[in-house]
């Protein structure tokens, strides 16, 4: 028996290969994929050849990228981190047969899981299985953004994800999947206002359909002027309480800084494949005493790991997806469902910008 796996063999080259299926051993289980979500950032960076791991080696001890890859980076055989599968055979009570689980094993038709090694997120029966693609990793990325905002405001004493947004004025730069899930979480947790800013008309339309106010950074009015005119806290104190920056472009970070009130914080969830050379730190960043916090899923805010582990962030994601937001996100965020066998062609088209999608999901 063979499993089918999506593999990036070289920049611009993607294939689907057969690999021998591993037998189910004591303590493991076999899961067959139902849905697998495509990440337009991380995954496409391997297809484009722009991922930093392709040309350098990450030294985890020093926390530095060092010149030179330790080995040939291709083929990339584990691509993707938004999988929903059904447990079809199990020799562990941690994954009962018949259950649906969210995992991060990449685009493949089936996988051998080990609950001592792999993150396994059981999905409740009342959750739309397609929304389960966000439960294991993508949703926690966005929830971690709110957690960083809460830690910034509450000095580490975070009891609830709403601690950083409840009653506050929030701007979200970008209108991709991360941005819109983050915006939904902010509204779900009580933000007084959430404004989404993106230059792409189609993405602004999706944000508007989800109920958010939208602004065009390339329009006639400067979004920073619009929001700072509207959002007054005191004399000389105007702008967003917190900005979630979700687009990996230098202009987006520069805009995020300009939207903030003095001494405000940008919570940055973006992946800057080309760096951010155009960010001008001598202007608003300096004169308004601003802060930028990188909210990468590999770390929660310092001192909170004991209370806010990845499973808790997954639980917060599932809570959002089971609320009325789930129906809205399913309707407006998922732009295409594509058969698994078309994955190689799809990824190349997305990387070459021959096809534009918000959220593509591969189906079994």
Image (spheres, rainbow, N blue to C red):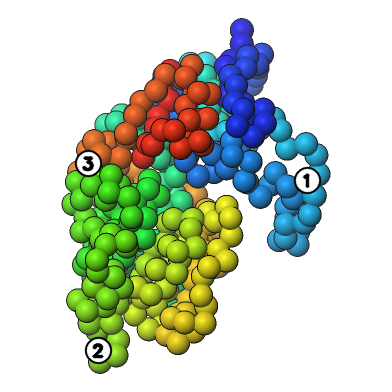
Residue 331 lies in quadrant: top left
Give the mark nearer the N terminus: 1 vs 2. 1
Whether residue 161 is situated above or below residue 347 in the rendered picture: below
* Label ID, residue 124: none
Whether residue 221 is situated above or below residue 56 in the rendered picture: below
Tell me which residue sits at (33%, 55%) in the image. Answer: 199
Real-space Cα distance between discs 3 and 1? Answer: 43 Å
Q: Are marks 1 and 2 in contact (CB under 8 Å)?
A: no
The residue carrying mark 3 is 328
In the depicted view, which residue is nearer to us: 306 or 61? 61
Residue 158 lies in quadrant: bottom left
Query: Disc 2 on helix, strand or loop?
Result: strand
How many marks are shown on the rendered structure? 3
Residue 204: % across, % down = 27, 50
Residue 304: % across, % down = 51, 64
Give the mark nearer the N terminus: 3 vs 1. 1
Observer able to see residue 281: yes
In the depicted view, which residue is nearer to us: 255 or 24? 255
Residue 140: % across, % down = 44, 49
* Label ID, residue 69: 1
Query: Disc 1 on helix, strand or loop?
Result: loop
Q: Nearer the viewer, mark 1 or mark 2?
A: 1
Residue 63 lies in quadrant: bottom right
Whether residue 41 is situated above or below residue 29 in the rendered picture: below
- Residue at the extreme front of the image, as rendered: 220
Tell me which residue sits at (57%, 66%) in the image. Answer: 277
Callout 1: few (<14), some (14-19), or many (20+) C-alpha neighbours within 10 Å? some
Real-space Cα distance between discs 1 and 2? Answer: 52 Å
Give the mark nearer the N terminus: 2 vs 3. 2
Tell me which residue sits at (63%, 41%) in the image. Answer: 49
* Label ID, residue 234: 2
Query: Disc 3 on helix, strand or loop?
Result: helix
């Amino acid at each position: 028996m063979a499993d089918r796996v999506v593999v990036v063999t070289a920049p611009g080259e993607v294939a689907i290969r057969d690999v021998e299926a591993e037998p189910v051993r004591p303590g493991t289980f076999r899961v067959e994929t139902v849905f697998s979500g495509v990440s337009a950032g991380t995954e496409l960076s391997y297809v484009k050849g722009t991922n930093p791991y392709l040309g350098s080696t990450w030294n985890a001890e020093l926390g530095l990228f060092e010149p030179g890859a330790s080995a040939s980076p291709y083929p990339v055989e584990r691509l993707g981190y938004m999988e929903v599968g059904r447990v079809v055979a199990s020799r562990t009570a941690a994954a009962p047969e018949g259950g649906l689980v969210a995992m991060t094993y990449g685009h493949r038709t089936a996988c051998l899981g080990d609950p001592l090694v792999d993150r396994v997120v059981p999905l409740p029966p009342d959750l739309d299985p397609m929304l389960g693609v966000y439960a294991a990793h993508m949703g926690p990325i966005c929830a971690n953004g709110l957690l960083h905002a809460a830690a910034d405001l509450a000095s580490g004493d975070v009891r609830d994800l709403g601690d950083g947004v409840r009653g506050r004025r929030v701007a979200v730069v970008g209108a991709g999947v991360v941005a819109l899930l983050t915006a939904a979480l902010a509204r779900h947790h009580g933000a007084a206002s959430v404004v989404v800013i993106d230059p792409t008309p189609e993405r602004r339309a999706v944000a508007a359909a989800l109920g958010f106010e939208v602004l065009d950074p390339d329009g006639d009015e400067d979004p920073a002027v619009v929001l700072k005119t509207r959002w007054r806290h005191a004399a000389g104190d105007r702008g967003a309480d917190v900005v979630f920056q979700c687009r990996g472009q230098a202009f987006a970070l520069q805009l995020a800084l300009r939207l903030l009130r003095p001494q405000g914080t940008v919570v940055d969830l973006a992946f800057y494949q080309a760096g951010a050379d155009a960010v001008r730190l001598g202007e608003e960043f300096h004169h308004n005493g601003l802060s930028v916090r990188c909210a990468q899923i590999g770390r929660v805010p310092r001192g909170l790991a004991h209370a806010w582990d990845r499973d808790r962030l997954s639980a917060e994601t599932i809570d959002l997806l089971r609320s009325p937001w789930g129906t809205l996100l399913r309707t407006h965020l998922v732009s295409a469902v594509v058969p698994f066998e078309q994955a190689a062609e799809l990824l190349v088209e997305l990387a070459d910008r021959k096809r534009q999608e918000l959220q593509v999901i591969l189906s079994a």
